[in-house]
Structure formats: C-alpha cells, structure tokens
C-alpha cells in the first residue's frame, strides 16, 4: 500500500472511496448526514461507517486534533485493507494533521508478513492525500519528512519482529552493516575478541552461554557542520531467556523484543541520515543473547565492569543493565557528546508504574526531560517521568561488591534499574544523559493507536521530533 500526496482537490482526485474524518458535532453538516444517521453512525472515536453506494468511509473522531486523526486513520486503513477497494482518498488541508495522517495510514497499515507462507491478499494499492493550495510545497516538505520517520519506524518494527533464530548478535551486526552501507554511515563492530580487549566483562558475562558471539556495534552519521553531537545507546538482547535465573515460560514468550532498544536506535540514525539533519549521531549497541548453559554466568558472580566498578550478580535476568553498563562506559569514552540517550526494554516494573503504552524517562536534568515532553506531544508517543531519589539508590548496595545488579526491595524497579545505569555515567555527563525504558511501549499483543500486533518502533518518532527541535 502506498501513500501519495497530490496537488489536487478531493473532488478532482480519482479514487474508489473518500475517507472522511467526522466529529459528533459535524455529522449534521455532512452531505450524507441522513444516511449516516440511518446507519447509526455516532462519530465515536475509531468507529467507522461505510456508505458504499456513496463511496464514503466515515471515520469518527472525538476532536479535530492530531491524536484523534492518527488513531482514526489507523482504524480506517485496516478496514480498507480488508475491503476490495484499490484506492482511497482523503482531504489534507491543515498542516497540523500531516504527521497524524501519515502515521495513522503507514504505521496503522503495517503488516509483518515475513513468515507467512502466503502473504495476506490486499486489494488496496494507494491512499491519496488530496492537498490543493498555494502552500502545497510546505505540505510536501512536511509529508516527505513524516514518511521518512514512519518508514524508519517500520524498519525498526521489521527487525524486532523477526524471530530469535534469525536475529542473533551476529546477524544483528550484519543488519547494522547493511544500513551503514546503504546510508553511508561509519561502522565499527567489535566481536568477543574486541570486547575482551576493552575489558567489557559485564557484557561478555551475559553472552557467555550463547552459541553466538556478543557484538558491540558503533554506527555514526557525521554531517559537515553539526549543531550538536548525540550518542544513542540501545539494549540489543536478541533473546532474553533470563539466564540461570530462568524466566517462567509465559514471561519468556515475546522476549525476542528485548532487542527493541537496539533496533530503535538503528531506526533513529536511519531517519536522521535520510532527513539530512545537521546533527552528528552516534549509535552504540550491545548485541547479546542471554542463555543458559554450563558456562553461563551465575547469581553470586562478581563482575569487573569496563569502568572497574565491581558488580554482584544476584539475578541473571537483570542482564540489560550489565550490558548497558559497559556500552555506556565505552560510548562516553569514544564520543564527547552533547547528549547521551539510552533506549532499553529494561524492566517489567516500568509497565507496572506507567502502563504498557508509556515509555519511562529517567535522568538528572529536568530541563532536558521537559524538552522530551514537548517532543512526545508532537510525535504521538507517550512518555512519563520516573524520578530518581537517594533512598532508592541505597537499595542497590552490595555487601561484597561496589553495586548489586538488583534492588533489595521489590518496589520502584524501573527507577532502581535507571539508578544502576547512573553509576556508569561519568560526572561530567550526568546532566546530558537520559534513560528511556521502553519495556511496555516497544511491543504489543493488541493493536492500539497506530500500533499493530508486535513491535511498535517505540522511540523513533520521539527521537526524530527531539532531533528536529534542536537549533
Ligand atoms: N527484558 C527484561 C524486561 C522486560 C520485561 C521487558 C517484560 C519487556 C517485558 C529484563 O531483562 C528483565 O528481565 N528485567 C527483570 C529485572 C528484575 C530481575 C530485577 C524484570 O523486569 O523482571
Ligand atoms: Zn532479563
Ligand atoms: Zn532483558
């Protein structure tokens, strides 16, 4: 299915059906008000009404705002994809809705068909956004940008959705290499030999029982005169079985998505390079598989991390923070960035705190967090702040090493995980760093907003909004 912007009025645009977004208040103003009433259409959010004889698909929206349109467009595209219409059109006359329509149609219409023996048959070929007016060029620029971001989000979703027998640390590194080649990015990859030379013993311990070699992936996008330098770190657990602290069977299912932070940062650098932003972007990924075996790392092990901080392992399922500890330390040494952001499916506790739709944001700089609240508003992603405090920090004390990899108390687990990472952020970088826990927001087993079953691509739209806001 293609989305096309055309410089024509809706009337002059040839398509099988017109998609119309309607609020309760506006039903009466509609040309087909009588028929819509007869059909029982009340314009409730995400409800749809096909008037086939009139070639109209009415889509209910609660308010005329971007969030309502994005969600309704997602509902519309799903219905259109299961119809026999080959083309549809809708009117675009408000700049505020360019992103919402692109996200709704592209992200809501996303399907992951990779493993089907027969791909779903879809008649729908094109949705036209009819946009006539003197300022078409402005709309076109916004549309093209929104398409780049939406496609980068789908790129992220595709990799996260792939099965763990296919995506392991080595093949994830190949994906990164391919992206680097296609988008002219610099690319450095360290295998286990390289990781040993760097003393990345915490990361190496997590991957030791895997048959695949852990990989550290570094991609960079370097425009000529960057306004800022940004480091993005991604948790790339291609599978998280829990290790010897083995997950329960039902909790293990979906753990292919533990690489969503890594795939997210790949989507972000893809978008940044395609949007040709004047911002230098560095991506660092710790790609590791957390497995069981005779050589697996154990609860009670003491790890000497790259930064020399010693870590008491009390739970091998709290592995993401061990990987990130070493990758964050490496990233801070390699690049003097203005901002450091990490993305990780780090804790189930984040979902308990914020629900499964919201990304948890942690860090020391309230000003920086506020800039992300703005970026979230304009991107359609949901974020919520989880505040650090010294009482929770004390719960990571170890009797035998510098820090324990889990908290001694059961509450505030997303924050204590964030505070664990904080231990590996250098003093001069404290105010530059934010941690994003995408455990809930990265993957869904029920469609919501413009997200369909599986990976959501969490972080990509958010980060693109933030990057575009930098001046
Ligand atoms: N990858 C998980 C976190 C997770 C859980 C992501 C559910 C998405 C959905 C992480 O490695 C983990 O297992 N965390 C533990 C930490 C605990 C042992 C302190 C958790 O959340 O239970
Ligand atoms: Zn785990
Ligand atoms: Zn994990």
Image (cartoon, rainbow, N blue to C red):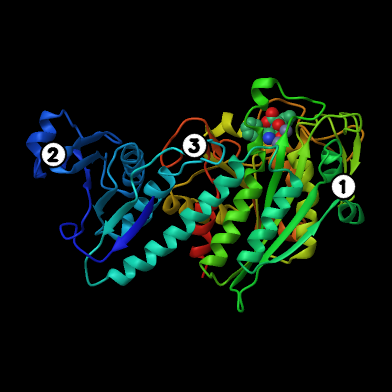
Residue that lies at the very extreme toward the bottom in this rendered image: 224
Of residues 270 and 70, the one drawn nearer to the viewer in this rendering = 270
Q: What x and y, as percent, mark residue 145? A: 44, 63
- Ligand 1 under 8 Å from disc 3 Cβ: no
- Asked whether disc 3 touches disc 1, contact meaning CB atoms under 8 Å apart, the reply is no
The crowding category of the residue bearing disc 1, from other C-alpha atoms within 10 Å (few below 14, some 14 to 19, many at least 20), is many
C-alpha distance separating marks 3 and 2: 32 Å
Percent from the top left, x then y, of residue 169?
75, 46
Spatial separation of the CA atoms under disc 3 and disc 1: 48 Å
Which quadrant of the structure image shows residue 166? top right
> Looking at the image, which is closer to me, 171 or 72?
171
Circle nearer the N terminus (1, 2): 2
Residue at (77%, 37%) from the top-left corner? 319
- Where residue 62 is drawn, which disc sits there? none
From the viewer's perspective, tell me whether residue 312 is left or right of residue 235: right
Q: Name the residue under label 1.
A: 305
310 vs 358, left or right, is right
Residue 338 in view of the camera? no
Residue at position x 23%, y 72% in the image:
134
Q: Mark 3 points at which residue?
A: 118
Find residue 53 and name its label.
2
Extreme residue toward the front, this view: 118
The mark that comes first in sequence, 3 or 2, is 2
């Amino acid at each position: 299915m293609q989305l096309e912007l055309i410089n024509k009025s809706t009337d002059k645009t040839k398509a099988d059906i017109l998609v119309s977004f309607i609020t309760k208040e506006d039903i009466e103003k509609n040309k087909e008000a009588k028929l819509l009433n007869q059909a029982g259409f009340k314009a409730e959010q995400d409800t749809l009404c096909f008037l086939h004889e009139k070639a109209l698909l009415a889509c209910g929206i609660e308010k005329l705002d971007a969030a309502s349109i994005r969600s309704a467009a997602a509902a519309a595209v799903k219905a259109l994809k299961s119809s026999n219409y080959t083309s549809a059109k809708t009117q675009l006359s408000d700049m505020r809705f360019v992103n919402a329509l692109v996200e709704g149609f592209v992200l809501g219409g996303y399907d992951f068909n990779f493993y089907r023996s027969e791909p779903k048959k879809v008649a729908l070929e094109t949705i036209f956004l009819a946009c006539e007016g003197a300022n078409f060029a402005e709309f076109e620029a916004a549309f093209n940008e929104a398409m780049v971001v939406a496609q980068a989000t789908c790129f992220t979703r595709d990799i996260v959705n792939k099965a763990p027998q296919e995506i392991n640390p080595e093949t994830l590194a190949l994906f990164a290499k391919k992206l680097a080649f296609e988008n002219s990015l610099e690319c450095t990859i360290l295998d286990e030999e390289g990781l040993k030379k760097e003393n990345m013993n915490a990361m190496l311990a997590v991957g030791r029982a895997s048959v695949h070699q852990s990989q550290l992936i570094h991609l960079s996008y370097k425009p000529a005169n960057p306004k800022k330098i940004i480091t993005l770190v991604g948790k790339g657990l291609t599978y998280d079985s829990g290790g010897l602290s083995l997950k329960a069977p039902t909790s293990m299912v979906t753990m292919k998505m533990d690489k969503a932070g890594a795939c997210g940062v790949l989507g972000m650098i893809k978008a940044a390079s395609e949007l040709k932003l004047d911002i230098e972007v560095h991506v660092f990924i710790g790609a590791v598989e957390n497995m069981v075996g005779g050589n697996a790392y154990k609860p009670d092990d003491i790890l000497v991390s790259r930064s020399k901080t010693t870590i008491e392992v009390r739970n091998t399922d709290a592995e993401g923070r061990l990987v990130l500890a070493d990758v964050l330390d490496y990233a801070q040494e390699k690049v003097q960035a203005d901002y450091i952001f990490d993305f990780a499916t780090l804790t189930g506790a984040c979902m308990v705190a914020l629900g499964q739709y919201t990304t948890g944001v942690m860090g020391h700089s309230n000003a920086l967090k506020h800039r992300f609240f703005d970026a979230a508003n304009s991107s359609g992603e949901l974020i919520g702040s989880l505040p650090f405090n010294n009482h929770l920090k004390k719960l990571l004390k170890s009797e035998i090493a510098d820090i324990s990899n889990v908290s001694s108390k059961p509450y505030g687990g997303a924050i204590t995980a964030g505070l664990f990472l904080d231990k590996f952020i250098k003093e001069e970088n404290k105010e530059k760093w934010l941690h994003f826990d995408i455990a809930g927001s990265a993957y869904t087993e029920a469609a919501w907003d413009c997200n369909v079953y599986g990976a959501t691509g969490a972080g990509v739209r958010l980060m693109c909004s933030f990057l575009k806001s930098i001046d």
